[in-house]
Amino acid sequence: MGTTFGRGGATNFQQDLANSDCIVIEGSNMAECHPVGFQWVMEAKARGAKVIHIDPRFTRTSAVSDVHVPIRVGTDIAFLGGIINHVLSNDLDFREYVVAYTNAAAIVGEDFVDTEDLDGLFSGFDPETGHYDEASWQFESQVGSGETGHTDRPGDGVDQDDPAGAQEQERLAQDESVKEADPHQAFGSGGPPLHAKPLRDETLQHPRCVFQVLKRHFARYTPEIVADICGVEPEVFLEVATAVTENSGRERTTAWVYSVGWTHHTVGAQYIRTAAILQSLLGNMGRPGGGILALRGHASIQGSTDVPTLFNLLPGYLPMPHALQHQSLDDYCAENSGAIGFWGNMRAYTVSLLKSWWGDAATAENDYCFGYIPKITGDHSSYRTIADMVAGKVPGYFLVGENPAVGHANGRMQRFGLANLDWLVVRDLQMIESASFWKTAPEIETGELVTEEIGTEVFYMPAATHAEKEGTFTNTQRLLQWRHQAVQPPGDCRSDLWFYFHLGRILREKLAGSTDPRDRPLLDLTWDYPTHGEQVEPSAEAVLREINGVGPDGRALSGYMDMKDDGSTTGGCWIYSGVYADEVNQADRRRPGREQDYVAAEWGWAWPYNRRTLYNRASADPAGKPWSERKKYVWWDEAAGRWTGDDVPDFEATKRPDHVPPPGAKAQAGIGGADPFIMQGDGKAWLFAPKGLADGPMPTHYEPAESPVENALYGVQANPGIEEIQAPYNRGNPPTSDVYPYVFTTYRLTEHHTAGAMSRTLPYLSELQPEFFVEVSPALATERGLDNGGWATLISARSAIEARVLVTERMRPLRLKGGRVVHQIGIPYHWGAEGLSTGDSANDLMGVVMDPNVHIQEFKVATCDIRPGRRPRGAALPEYVEGFRRRAGVRSGTMPIGGRVAVEETP
């Protein structure tokens, strides 16, 4: 969504679902996995909204929906692409919205070649590197930033404060080490920079305008093709397409809801892109009851990307500097220097961050300590790091709230990695499999690991629960809510804030007096947080204020528009600036809902600037008037000379709707009064992305990495940019293999939480779901001789696991092209060796193949075989799995004792 709209967060808030006329839940089992938010889906249904659930399994969400659409896992782009084709072929788009608020009118350069002409590839693909060069995807652009002249040359029209520096950054961005670092993730709160606005044809008739390019691209996604690929009958597909289009437009809006059922794919980013394109065509963005709601899988997953735990991001989605590109602050800011949109102020956000971290030590003379920030050199993501651990390249590792031995793809690979460390620090609420792997790992039983020979020293440090510490959650809808401490943590349990503060304090004390330059970044940190209580707990509120930032007068900033690039302001995360405005903890506001309207702006605080619906300028027409009285939300008040409405306008409050930027205007000054997508360089929603995505400017259907069928659309089978780790522990199942003929998908249960540490240790929850099981259809049970309640063994090229069998009509076989029947197996992934309820780990079946945009693994679809009975024990298990590999023509996956091997060269 960041590439399409300018920010990666959910565009609306959960309560707003009650205003929807149609809700499509796809890639999510919202009723079971997000039951609190699901109440507003039921409220919308009670008001007459149509609820549609698209999912391979019939779940509790399906049971209360008006329509359930069983779909083959991994084919959502084909399904959504079919709806886009339906919209474009029948002129069902919201044309005024599309022309004014999207880049449909932008003209693509002559060098661009679509997948339709290259059998599944876009122009610019390099088969040797597996990466795209985006040069041929660029628009024909206007001269300068806001000038009205035209040029016939395609490109992003670099014309800014530092053109030479920007062009050098563009050149370096093509280096393989930079591409491997996936800089596209930095567009979570600011789209890719455009330094000139595209040439446009407002009639949408130019053959190379985005609208026509899009129309041609999706033309082959007919109801029949959707049926061939997805297994969805044409009449069911048309029922969904009709419901969505009839409930979109001036008077009505449709909302799309997704979760990890979309993100955990090798084309996960493009799943979301497809929905974003569709919602933009239908005019559902920035409007009440519309938008795209990204449901996060944990209480503060949104917060952990905003103030990031990702290797290639700094707080607020600022990109992590790369050693090749960014030797100075000027290098780092060059590409965005003077760009149009609020991302053009990147230098102010960065300098404020550096001042927040290093205070008085950060000066203009020393580049505000920019040199202190570590620089990345390529892919340092989780799975690549695990591969380096297996190879013996990583001495130490911190695991904080993660249980990769159970919760990550390819548990066998994870455990081999943990076994080849010197030391491991685990912070968790319970003893987890990633801390006890040295004695509980399945590889101990098979003989692939030997407890006495594992050299990893494990430090288990118990953590405080959410009730035992203060601080904020940032939830699904970008909402920060303050959490007060209810009780003291027991024994040695401590908060994360306590742990890192005192770890930093001790390290600084040990280094005091050091003259080694490499110690200066640690010694110069601002580390003077006040503490309180017997446990000497740092003040979480002081940290929140630091994140908010302060001005030259020492008072908290009111928001990021107050940030300066001259070192006079601080701010630990620019998008959170305003959460401590007026020296008040805005996240701690608790005005009851009965005393507010449905937007509830005085409950907590949402980034940015407490805006609950993003891009809400689009809820009014270009003249600033609501599209309809029924969907009125934010509008221009001519008498007051400002934007007003039910929400904080996601727009400059006094910028008139008829404002035209002057020639050469930069940053927000370059955004016109009718350009709602203020983080984008052209102020528009991007139907076509000339940059910002690693695998193409438009979504296209590719099969999952492991699929039982060939791609029905193109000769290219899977995502050409797919990321793989070639090693014995990560062998892949060949596509269309008869040895691994069945599709499986993983999911969560209401009664258990993620990798199970918080639920399998509790007797009440363990009693509700006491045993690991898999769901199969009656047809598959008959085909494979499986008994309900009996045992089954599932086998992939990575491992084999056993589970109880649940035979259920919730899993339905699907009929594809040529009458091919595909069976799908559902597997909950919560089990491991620790706790009261134990069992094999579903993720041991999974291989590590990843989306090239975000390094997210394909958790939600792979292939396997399933046989009745229990799996072999001891050394017989790896030999059993190896036998399947041999029959499938897969290279050996046998590992040496101790599990230390290097990654293989890509063939």
Image (cartoon, rainbow, N blue to C red):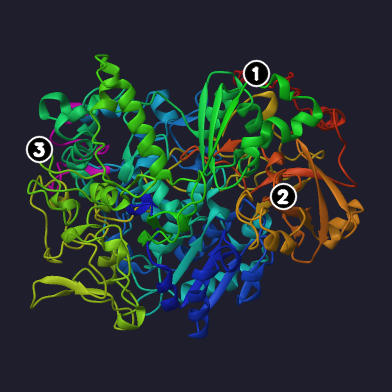
Q: Is residue 173 magenta?
A: no
Q: Which residues are magenta?
A: 140-165
The answer to whether residue 679 shows anywhere in this view is no
Return the residue found at the far bottom. 47
Earlier in the chain: of badge 2 and badge 3, it is 3
- The residue at which mark 1 appears reads as 901
- Residue 49 x, y percent position in the rendering: 50, 80
Badge 1 amino acid: Val
Residue occupying image coordinates x 16% and y 48%: 550
Q: Position of residue 630 (x, y in %)?
A: 33, 83
Categorize mark 2 by other alpha carbons within 10 Å: few (<14), some (14-19), many (20+).
many
Residue 566 badge? 3
Viewer-proximal residue among 19 and 417? 417
Q: Amino acid at mark 2?
A: Phe
Q: Quadrant of the C terminus?
A: top right
Q: CA distance from mark 1 to mark 2?
A: 29 Å
Q: Which residue, given by chain and number where applicable, does mark 2 sit on?
A: 744
Whole-Å distance between the Cαs marked 2 and 3? 55 Å
Can see residue 615? yes
Q: Nearer the viewer, residue 214 or 875?
A: 875
Tell me if mark 1 has few (under 14), some (14-19) or many (20+) residues whose alpha carbon lies within 10 angstroms of its own: many
- Say which quarter of the image contains residue 418: top right
What residue is at 66 percent from the left and 40 percent from the top?
433
Q: In 3D space, how far apart are the residues under numbered discs 3 and 1 (Cα atoms)?
A: 50 Å
